[in-house]
Amino acid sequence: MPELPEVETVVRTLAPYLVGRRIVEARFTSRFVTPGNRAKLARQVSGRKIEAVTRRGKFIVMALDQGHLIVHLGMTGKLLSNGTPTTHTHGVFTLDEGVLFYDDPRQFGRIEWGDARVKKLGPEPLLVGLAEFSASLRKRKTRVKALLLNQAFIAGLGNIYVDEILFLSGIHPLAQASRLSAPRVAKMHQAMVEILTLAIAHRGSSISDYVDADGNRGDFQMLHRVYGREGEACVQCGTAIRKVVVAGRGTHYCPACQRRRPA
DNA sequence: CTTAATGTTCCCCA
DNA sequence: TTGGGGAACATTAA
């Protein structure tokens, strides 16, 4: 469900409901989503006022009057400002006005106290400059697909957007990061900004689970050029889109438009 | 019945 | 320390 554009959309739709609210009571019921002492976590957030809701990478950061609560949506997590609890509701926040549910069928998401996790993240893709981006990229010998998925290298990209960024910049997912020419790195940096900005404007991609805090789907999946299009014709050249496994993830690319060696 | 899914972490090995 | 591969986590849908 959640890469940078989806998490950004959740934060934007969530903030109006949460900022200025006080958490009256919290209940957590999953030993996966809230590992450790769930009752203690509930006590820590109870009575706290929510002062800001922001995004860092794929994390939703709630700044409280005392401390921080961070939420990662994993693969199928949802934060919903309305509705009713289901079998997949693993967190319920009762607010002084309204309620907030955390739903997550696969329970890969996490709700944690403190901001330790976000301090280990790499730079934001929409803020990092080309100079810094290319300098750090030049030091890494791994495949570019794996590197862009590495949250400590750059924070917020996931499987969909990495594939789309590499297609738009004409770079093969198996290309070695340090061996990319300066013009190709510049193109990748530009594609990263373009794709993410456009995807946020379209309120993210809804493939199966993703909805924002109001329960609405995004529509950027309509604009995917390679992700989920295995065997279909490339929009640029007509060649069949290929799918391979890289870094353990399904990886979609056009074998004609994305060559390991520049044309 | 098998496979794959928007994610991350851990373990083994080179 | 870096990097590749695979498994694990839990659930659903095709």
Image (cartoon, coloured by chain):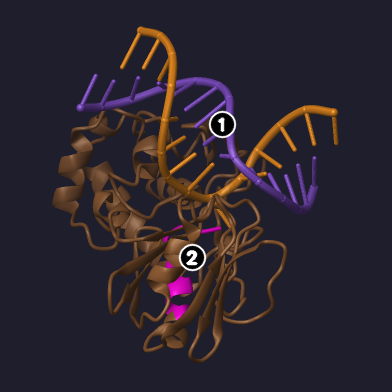
Chain colours: A brown, B orange, C purple
**Can see residue A128?**
yes
Which element carries disc 2, helix, strand or loop?
Answer: helix
The amino acid on which the numbered mark 2 sits, given as a three-letter code, is Glu
Tell me the crowding category of disc 2: few under 14, some 14 to 19, or many 20 or more residues within 10 angstroms, Cα based: many
Q: Relative to the observer, which residue lies in front, A144 or A89?
A: A89
Label 2: chain letter: A
Q: Residue furthest bottom?
A: A97
Q: Residue at x 18, y 41 (%)?
A: A136
Is residue A200 one of those drawn in magenta?
A: no
What count of labels does the image hold? 2
Position of the C terminus of chain A, as image quadrant, is top left
**A107 with respect to A22 (left or right):** right
Residue pointed to by mark 2? A6
Q: As displayed, is residue A199 above or below residue A83?
A: above
Residues shaded magenta: A1-14
Q: Earlier in the sequence, mark 1 or mark 2?
A: 2
Q: As displayed, is residue A14 above or below residue A20?
A: above
Splitting the image into 4 quarters, where does residue A207 fall? bottom right
The amino acid on which the numbered mark 1 sits, given as a three-letter code, is Val
Per the model, the C-alpha gap separating discs 1 and 2 is 25 Å
Q: Residue at x 43, y 70 (%)?
A: A43
Can you give x and y, in whole percent of width and height, for residue A27 in the image?
A: 55, 69
* Tag of residue A147: none
Which element carries disc 1, helix, strand or loop?
Answer: strand
Residue pointed to by mark 1? A244
Splitting the image into 4 quarters, where does residue B13 fall? top left
Can you give x and y, in whole percent of width and height, for residue C3 in the image?
A: 33, 25
